[in-house]
Image: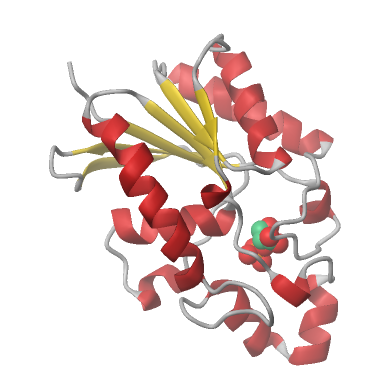
Amino acid sequence: MNERLLVLVRHGQSEWNLKNLFTGWKDPDLTEKGVAEAKEAGRKLKAQGLTFDIAFTSALTRAQHTLDLALAEMGQTGLPITRNLALNERDYGDLSGLNKDDARAKWGEEQVHAWRRSYDVPPPGGESLKDTLARTLPYFVQEILPCVLRGERTLVAAHGNSLRALIMVLEKLTPEGILARELATGVPVIYRLNADATVASKLDLAG
Ligand SMILES: O=C(O)[C@@H](CO)OP(=O)(O)O
């Protein structure tokens, strides 16, 4: 049966998530908690009775490590995995490596929130969500979606903002709608798509 399965999962907690630093294209690995979250994601997916045919991830360690741990937990280690920087986190530009609370103290709560969650306000020297979408969406449409539509059960392990960009398109969210959308670390979201790539069903495995 062609079930057109697409699962998106944000990486587990990274060293820089723990330190509350803007990360973007910097490449810290998972914390111990992040490792546990990645394994838990695998357990949750297995408990749903899911198996995968193909997986995609970014060029960054925290997403690749999350994918490997989740698949190992599912006993699915032989899967073809494609890594591409199109799925990388938004580039945080000059904010990369800064503490998020220090940034709020310096530039104000509202400005920092706009940089972090708005659709089209880029952080200084970095990518807005719109910019992130501009490189994530073509990769999704050309490389990932065709797999899903031909019935290959597909797992994507990536990042808060590269996944928010894809979710905005999948769920047809407006720039206002995406503003409040947060993705927890290590929580899979299961989509089943219609033949025209619209969403038939969505199940968020939070909790
Ligand atoms: O620092 C980052 O790269 C991202 C994800 O951790 O942060 P934010 O939630 O601010 O977009």
Which image quarter holds the N terminus?
top left
Q: Nearer the viewer, residue 204 or 93?
A: 93
How far from the left and from the top, in percent, is residue 63?
64, 39
Above or below — where is 2 with respect to 156?
above
Above or below — where is 30 with respect to 80?
below
Q: Residue at x 65, y 88 (%)?
A: 111
Asked if residue 22 lies left or right of residue 127, the reply is: right
Q: Residue at x 58, y 80 (%)?
A: 122
Q: Nearer the viewer, residue 175 or 187?
A: 175
Tally the numbered discs: 0
Outermost residue on the left side: it is: 195
How far from the left and from the top, in percent, is residue 145?
30, 40
Quarter, ligand 1: bottom right
Q: Is residue 207 visible?
A: no
Q: Residue at x 41, y 48 (%)?
A: 139
Kindly indicate the quadrant of the structure image that contains residue 149. Answer: top left
Q: Nearer the viewer, residue 206 or 74?
A: 74
Above or below — where is 148 with respect to 108?
above
Q: Is residue 177 visible?
A: yes
How far from the left and from the top, in percent, is residue 195?
13, 37
Rendering colour mode: secondary structure
Kindly indicate the quadrant of the structure image that contains residue 112. Answer: bottom right
How far from the left and from the top, in percent, is residue 128?
54, 74
Q: Residue at x 61, y 73 (%)?
A: 116
